[in-house]
């Protein structure tokens, strides 16, 4: 199997925050990889924008440092850098906007990527419109967080919609650009094998885990204002839940897909705060505690959260979804595990009832899927049952395919194409906050403190109890 590269038309990409961390780690390398792959050519232009007073050569040197890696072809790198220009702009003032207006070309797709703090989204959008830089065919890309609560999300959406139509706004969630996340839709809707089983009569429960080994050191002050609920559950895990639980859309178009995701968010039952496990990692050896890294010895912000979520519709009534995410855990791992029900009757005498089949969809670090099945243990001596796994690790199974794209590579190219399928719509964001806000308010009103847990563990004891009281167990992190 060989992947196909579908070229996009010439475009002007204007990257605000062009000297920032995200630009350096993800956006510039992603653009370079797509250029090398032949997805766009020298007819396109990449305009870096920030407050810094830099000459074009100095900025290109920064971009070169960001994208240069072992094995890079120097000639390709030099051709890429010819596309890169730089403009110094004051996002909240008047400096530089005339230069940007003169730099973008007529009759060319214009994409404005705002890799900046959310407080700058509105001012930048207004100045793009005021200076005639935004056209009806322009696209504006904004990074999370999409607000801090429902009120701020609505205010942010209003600011953006004053200058851009909803079909021009691309709210980027890099989890939706992951290869395995998209394969989840293909698995469900392009195969007749699984979809008839994808309901509460056949599935016992679903576990969605996003575990991280890293602490919040270096960004603790920011993280302390959000916590795991705002930083991960309300957006990343919510989107994974939607794609797992959504009904088949009538067709694979942006609004058809997003309509079905919205229905899931609106069907979520309220979650009592007593049924949520919140944790905060404690100091261990040379590793500081969460409170040390946040610079706040009295912090009650969670670095870990686990909860049981119920989807109140006909497909999923009685099948819980368990969500879990945290910092400083045993391993870095993201997966969706679908636990099918046990056989209704065991016909093999003297054997234990086997665990039901489990379909594990791995998002990172080894993208792929594994189906755990029950088979006969080979050898004489009667019918003994054991487990065997049908594994498809993409790197092994699709060896002839090109290296999987980073999520940002795919999503940026989707922006240029005008495809919003993998981007969140404004009403999705607001509905997610409407569900999350009462939970966060409940913690604040009751002055609830997170439970301490050890660095390198699977989280606090309360997370285990959450499952044990339902007669279930979490999958081991790093298993």
Image: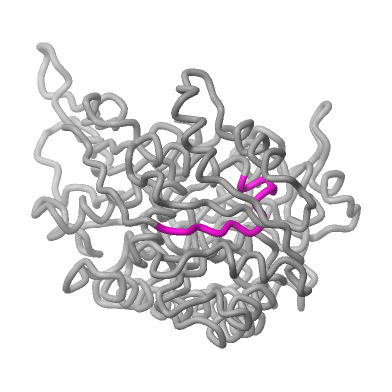
Foreground of the two, 235 or 411: 411
As for residue 360 lying within the magenta part, the answer is no
Q: Quadrant of the C terminus?
A: top left
Q: In which quarter of the image is residue 68?
A: top right
| Residue 125 in the image, given as x and y percentages of width and height | 61, 76
Expressed as whole percent of the image width and height from the top left, the position of residue 17 reads 67, 55
Residue 122 found in image quarter: bottom right
Q: Residue sitting at 24 percent across and 52 percent down? A: 341
Q: Which quarter of the figure is the N terminus placed in?
A: top left
Q: In this view, does 430 lie above or below 27?
A: below
Instruction: Using residue 459 as the reference point, say whether residue 198 is left or right of it.
Output: left
The boundaries of the magenta stretch are: 11-23
Instruction: Measuring from the top left, give residue 422's x and y in whole percent.
Output: 37, 61
Name the one closer to the observer, 337 or 247. 247
Q: Is residue 272 left or right of residue 422?
A: right
As rendered, which of 67 and 384 lies closer to the eye? 67
Position of residue 74 relative to residue 416, above or below, is above
Residue ID at (30%, 76%): 255
Seen as rendered, the residue at the extreme front is 102
Question: Is residue 388 in sight in this rendering?
Answer: no
């Amino acid at each position: 199997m060989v992947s196909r590269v579908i070229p996009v038309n010439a475009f002007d990409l204007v990257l605000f925050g062009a000297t920032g961390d995200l630009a350096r780690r993800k956006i510039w390398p992603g653009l370079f990889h797509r250029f090398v792959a032949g997805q766009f050519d020298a007819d396109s232009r990449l305009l870096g924008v920030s407050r810094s007073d830099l000459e074009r050569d100095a900025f290109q040197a920064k971009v070169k440092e960001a994208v240069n890696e072992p094995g890079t072809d120097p000639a390709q790198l030099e051709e890429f850098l010819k596309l890169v220009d730089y403009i110094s702009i004051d996002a909240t003032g008047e400096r530089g906007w005339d230069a940007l207006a003169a730099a973008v070309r007529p009759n060319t797709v214009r994409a404005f990527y705002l890799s900046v703090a959310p407080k700058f989204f509105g001012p930048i959008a207004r100045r793009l419109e005021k200076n005639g830089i935004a056209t009806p065919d322009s696209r504006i890309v904004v990074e999370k967080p999409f607000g801090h609560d429902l009120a701020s999300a609505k205010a942010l959406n209003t600011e953006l919609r004053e200058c851009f139509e909803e079909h021009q706004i691309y709210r980027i969630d890099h989890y939706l650009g992951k290869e395995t996340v998209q394969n989840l839709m293909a698995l469900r809707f392009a195969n007749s094998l699984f979809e008839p089983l994808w309901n509460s009569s056949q599935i016992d429960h679903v576990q969605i885990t996003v575990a991280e080994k890293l602490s919040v050191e270096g960004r603790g002050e920011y993280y302390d204002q959000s916590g795991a609920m705002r930083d991960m559950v309300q957006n990343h895990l919510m989107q994974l839940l939607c794609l797992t639980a959504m009904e088949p859309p009538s067709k694979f178009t942006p609004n058809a897909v997003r309509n079905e995701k919205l229905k899931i968010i609106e069907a979520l039952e309220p979650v009592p705060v007593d049924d949520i496990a919140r944790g905060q990692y404690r100091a261990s050896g040379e590793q500081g505690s969460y409170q040390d890294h946040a610079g706040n010895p009295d912090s009650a912000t969670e670095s870990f959260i686990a909860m049981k979520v119920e989807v109140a519709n006909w497909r999923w009534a009685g099948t819980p979804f368990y969500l879990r995410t945290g910092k400083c855990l045993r391993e870095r791992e993201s997966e969706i595990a679908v636990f099918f029900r046990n056989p209704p009757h065991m016909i093999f005498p003297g054997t234990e009832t086997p665990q039901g089949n489990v379909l594990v969809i791995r998002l990172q670090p080894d993208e792929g899927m594994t189906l755990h099945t029950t088979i006969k243990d080979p050898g004489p001596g009667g019918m003994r049952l054991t487990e065997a796994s049908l594994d498809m690790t993409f790197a092994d199974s699709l060896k002839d395919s090109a290296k999987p794209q980073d999520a940002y590579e795919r999503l940026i190219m989707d922006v240029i194409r005008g495809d919003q399928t993998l981007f969140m719509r404004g009403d999705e964001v607001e509905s997610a906050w409407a569900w999350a806000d009462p939970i966060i308010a409940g913690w604040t009103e009751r002055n609830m403190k997170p439970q301490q847990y050890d660095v390198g563990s699977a989280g606090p004891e309360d997370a285990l109890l959450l499952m044990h009281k339902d007669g279930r167990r979490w999958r081991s992190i790093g298993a």
